[in-house]
Image: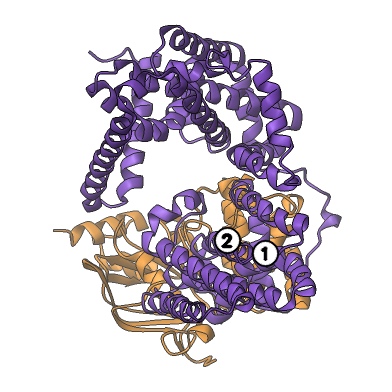
Amino acid sequence: MNTASPALRLSALRKSFGRPAVDGLDLTVRRGELYALLGPNGAGKTTTLRMVTGLLAPDEGNVDVLGIDLARDPAGAKRGMAYLPDEPLLYGKLKPTEYLEFVAGLWGIRAQDAEPRARHLLDWLDLTQHAHELTEGFSRGMKQKLALAGALIHDPELLILDEPLTGLDAAAARQVKDLLVSHVDKGGTVILTTHILEVAERLAQRIGIIRQGRLIAEGTLAELRARTQGGSLEDVFLQLTEGQAG
Amino acid sequence: MSAAPGSIPWLLGHELRLAWYGAGRNMSGKRGRGRIGMIVGIVFAAVMHLVAFAALRALGHDGMNDGFLAIPLTAVLVVCATFMLSSALTGCVTALFERGDLDLLLSSPLPSRTVFAVRLLGIAAATATPYLLLAGPFANVALVLGHPGWLGLYVIIGACAMVMACAGMLLTLALVRLLGARRTRVVAQVMGAIAGALLFLLSQAYNLTRHDGSTGPWLLGLLANQHVFGPDSALWLPGRAILGAPGPLLGALVLAALAFALTVGRTHRFFVHGLQQAAGAGRVRARPADALRFRFRGSLFDTVVVKEWRLIARDPHLIAQVLLQLIYLVPLLFPILRDNTTGPALGAGLALLCGSLTASLAWIVISGEDAPDLLLSAPAPRRTLQLAKLAAATMPALLLVALPLLWMIVHAPLTGLLFAFSISAAVLSAGLIVLWTGRPAPRSDFKMRAKGNFLSTMLEMTSSLCWGGLGWLLVALATDGSTWMLFASAAVLAAGLGVMVVAWLLRRSPM
């Protein structure tokens, strides 16, 4: 793995579903940063993330993950990243322990590495007492936390999260936010999309704003404020997205 | 004039609208195909009316008035009633455990009695619909031919469906009370499957007895002597009701109304209680943290196979569906155990059934994958995932027939080996066809899978028929040795392989 390369580089990425969903997107996320990808509904955030994680094939353009070309070596690129979509990828008829066993198997993690990590994650996310229940009976927050445990079981360098705080209560949301910060502190990279702008404002080192599949602004919060008339991220976001509307 | 909001007719209208949309979705899936679905429906209705016309014309004017007609009509109604009970049980389990809009309805100020009554009517209507579609044309044609009494068919099917819906609901609620919600879900669905196969199993009971010809005539003689089977017997009242006899018709209506009124009046509160229990059925008691046990497996293949088997084993709905196939499989084994024979038809039947079972399991594990995005986003080799899923789908059928096959190979080695070949080919082909041509769908669509992917289903069926036919021909060839069988075997083998080539050519980007 090329450690000098960025965590993620998108070059002229395009995807169309009749109309362009992602339209020539160029984006670079550096290693060790928390990057927030913002945009109004239908801006192309989820489509972008699905192309990054290999769930969708781009019509054009390149995706490099941790220095590995996703098209050439998909397994190599996927090995170092984890994806947490807005709807948790769970099996209702599996218990949390079994789910983590399965995900560890998919990523080829050895039992001696996976087991202590699984125990730690279940404990840390307050799921240990529910470890023998089927996940179909879980609340939305518990499902999201278990999916997060699955995403972290292989200790990914790049963590990609699509609306990770949707449906979480205050305590669970705090846990997830702490986890993201901790992941970055340990040298990992986080890319997240969110509609809760305060989260991006508080956590993100850099923010990218996309609209109609194109990156319309990028930078730190201060840089974005400088481009507009300042104020909160919400003001900046609305000025940028509505300013270019129509 | 619209019904008052909150009344039974108002809620019934809402249910009918949902059912109509659901039927449209099931028939078409896409907007453009809705018209095709409607055309198919009209053609089906026209064909059924033609069939009914031909059958009733053959029966003649006197035949349609013949009192003896009540006897076969009663027999057909009894057969339909067992299937109706099976459908009703499935409907009741669905109503309790897959709640749909029940949470919304029960959280509203609507009386629980209204909600329960409408849901029960919905189950009865869903139970009756297929029978009305099949039998209705006979009543219509009879009316045109001057026999309005046959319109009693509609009444009797509706009444029978209502009684069976009430029986199914009472049985399901009783099971909830006796066994708890978790076990009820499994038990009620298995009971539904058994009810559907009950008459088939009873018909096969003859295979369990020695064919000395004594039992059947003895039983019939006994009943005839007691005048139980006479044309005036009360046993044939349902048949007479179908033919429009006012007394039996009225009796059926009163029975259905009483069943409905008593079920709603006596159990609507328990229905709500059952729903509350069902809502917590997915959860099991938490264990202390020190009981945490992991079993990480050494290979991806094992991990996937174990995961698939766990998911199937924990889904009572799927188990019930698969069990229904196994129930039909079991009587085929009776002749071997009874007569020590291994006829060609047996091998063909086993190949057909194992192929069918594998196709169902393959659909569950491949097309019905719950988290395809998880597999796609993982660095796991796709080929290993596919092989593991194929193994998870094919191994149960092979394990199921392993012992009978072994028994056959010991007693008749050549026949047993030919059976083993045809069964293995049927199983593997069914799995591969689903792997190549299956379309992703939620597991809850299992029962509708044939409609969802007609081409794949046709390929599965043709393939199973080919391998079953080949097994039959090869065993017959080994014992008879006719030249035409050799050519026929070659032709059927070519057809079976041809189906596989077609499936491979039509393969989709998997998982």
| Residue drawn at 53 percent across, 18 percent down | B236
In the rendered image, what is the letter of the chain coloured purple?
A: B
Q: Is residue B409 above or below residue B312?
A: below
Residue A137 location in percent, x, y? 63, 45
Under mark 2, the amino acid is: Leu
Proximity of marks 1 and 2: CB atoms separated by less than 8 Å: yes
The residue lying toward the viewer, choosing from A96 and B321, is: B321
Crowdedness near tag 1: few (<14), some (14–19) or many (≥20) residues, C-alpha within 10 Å: some
Residue A192 location in percent, x, y? 46, 65
Residue A199 location in percent, x, y? 47, 57
Q: Quadrant of the N terminus of chain B?
A: top left
The answer to whether tags 1 and 2 share a subunit is yes
Q: Is residue A71 above or below residue B101?
A: below
**Residue A153 appearing in the image:** no
In the rendered image, what is the letter of the chain coloured orange?
A: A
Q: Which residue is mark 1?
A: B396
Q: Is residue B183 left or right of B198 when viewed as pictured?
A: right
Corner quadrant of residue B409: bottom right
Residue B400 location in percent, x, y? 70, 63
Under mark 1, the amino acid is: Pro
Q: Secondary structure at mark 2?
A: helix
Q: Which residue is mark 2?
A: B361
The residue lying toward the viewer, choosing from B225 and B42, is: B225
Q: Chain of mark 1?
A: B
Q: Is residue A46 above or below residue B5?
A: below
**Residue A197 appearing in the image:** yes
Q: Secondary structure at mark 1?
A: helix
C-alpha distance separating marks 1 and 2: 9 Å
Corner quadrant of residue A238: bottom left
Q: Earlier in the sequence, mark 1 or mark 2?
A: 2
